[in-house]
Amino acid sequence: FGHSHIPWDTTAPGGLRLLNPGSPTDRRRQPFCTFMTAVVTGGELADIRLHQLPRRG
């Protein structure tokens, strides 16, 4: 799933959270390079953020 380099954040019908951070180095048809950060509090995902990097060149 992560090899697509396409940022993704969704929850499947059964409750499974699917995260793909994209790529900080290879944007693969995306407008920006990206990465994700996650905060876990008390064993639960508390904060997921997708970060865009500035374009190079």
Image: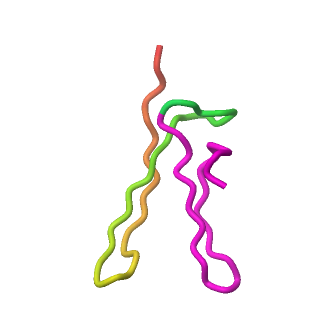
The reply, left or right, for residue 51 in relation to residue 8 is left
Total numbered badges shown on the rendered structure: 0
Question: Does the segment drawn in magenta span residue 17?
Answer: yes
| Above or below: residue 10 compared with residue 2 | below
Q: Position of residue 49 (x, y in %)?
A: 42, 58
Q: Position of residue 4 (x, y in %)?
A: 68, 45
| Above or below: residue 24 compared with residue 49 | above
Question: Residue at left 46%, top 41%?
Answer: 52
Q: Position of residue 36 (x, y in %)?
A: 44, 53
The reply, left or right, for residue 22 in relation to residue 40 is right
- Boundaries of the magenta span: 1-24
Question: Residue at left 58%, top 63%?
Answer: 9
Q: Position of residue 16 (x, y in %)?
A: 60, 78
The reply, left or right, for residue 35 in relation to residue 13 is left
39 vs 51, nearest the viewer = 39
| Above or below: residue 19 compared with residue 24 | below
Colour convention: rainbow
Question: Residue at left 38%, top 56%?
Answer: 37
9 vs 25, nearest the viewer = 25
Q: Quadrant of the N terminus?
A: bottom right
Question: Does the segment drawn in magenta span residue 40?
Answer: no
Q: Residue furthest left?
A: 42
| Above or below: residue 26 compared with residue 9 | above
